[in-house]
Image (cartoon, rainbow, N blue to C red):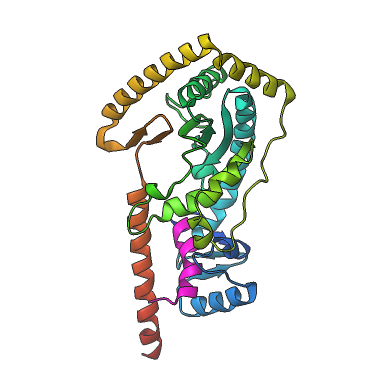
Amino acid sequence: MFSSVEGALLTPVIFFDLFDRPIKVDELGELSYGIALESSQRDVVLAQLEARGTIQRVGEYVVLPGRESIIEPWYQRQLAQRALWVEAESVIGCLAGVPFVRMVAVVNSLSLNTARETSDIDLLVVVEPGWLAVARDHMLARLELLGRRAHKLPKQGKVFPDIILSTDRLELASWRMEPLDIYLDYWLAHVEPVIDRNGTYAKLIGSNTWLRHTFPSWHQRRERLLAPDAQREQHRQAWELWYRSLPGRAMSAGQQVWYSTRMRRYRTKIGEKGTVIVGPNQLRIHEPDKRPEHQRKFDERWRELEQVTIQLPVHQSA
């Protein structure tokens, strides 16, 4: 068994090992799970874990025992991620003119720094209540024109707005698997906003207070916010003004019916292979939903490390 402080540091190392990502020592403070640690306390605990064979220190990185081989490929993956971020920011900038969008954030592999050359770009989009179908139609149309819509193979570099929420539906605790959903915890902590209007990102974090308890040293991520483009802002506002008119509302009602019909068909098609949740205030597509698999592998590696920790002192005394 690990102490609570040891578990706080081991949790991110085990989680990111699932994706062959080594963790830098300096990252562990923000990523430590459930407990805030000073750097001096962190270093003491890491030294203890290394002495017991629970982790390995390789330069600035921490990895699980026997996993030092993931470090060298990691450098190449970082180059691929930089290229993906350039593409992501370019495409998201073009989505700034989509009506009723209040936030666009990168999620999943690119935000978690686990992306590979073949990865696509997943988005979390937050829209004004009542306009989800309109915003989604405009986004998909723009992505189609840009050749970036992720509905055909290959998906490398394509953009997929797989989660769309409205500003009155930002609480995510109901998404959790029980008793633990390690992927959701790190997923939310790594949501990377690129467009943020009306303080929507802060509202998302404020609606999920459990995040602060899970990661006491965590800070909001605003490093990749794009500066507003005046022309695109005017374009968006013009569309919103039109949709609020009588003919615009009639058209949006038709779009809502068509959206609900399409997504119900899609949900039936996916069946048990994934999770598709469709509603007027949220759309979630997880195809497949890998969270149960991630949780199972995380639990297995945790138990393996416990066995190493228990057995090693006996081996040494022998």
Task: In the displayed orientation, state which residue is furthest to the bottom.
Answer: 317
Q: Position of residue 166 (x, y in %)?
A: 49, 34
Q: From the viewer's perspective, is residue 261 above or below residue 107?
A: above
Q: From the viewer's perspective, is residue 125 above or below residue 179?
A: above
Q: Is residue 191 visible?
A: no
Q: Position of residue 165 (x, y in %)?
A: 47, 35
Which quadrant is the N terminus positioned in?
bottom left
Q: Position of residue 31 (x, y in %)?
A: 55, 61
Would residue 14 be counted in the magenta stretch? yes
Magenta part of the protein: which range? Answer: 1-16
Main SS class of the magenta portion in the image? helix
Residue at point 37%, 84% (across, down) = 315
Considering depth in this image, is 241 or 181 the residue closer to the camera?
241
Which quadrant is the C terminus positioned in?
bottom left
Instruction: Report the side of 188 relative to 182 (left or right).
Output: right
Q: Position of residue 58 (x, y in %)?
A: 57, 67
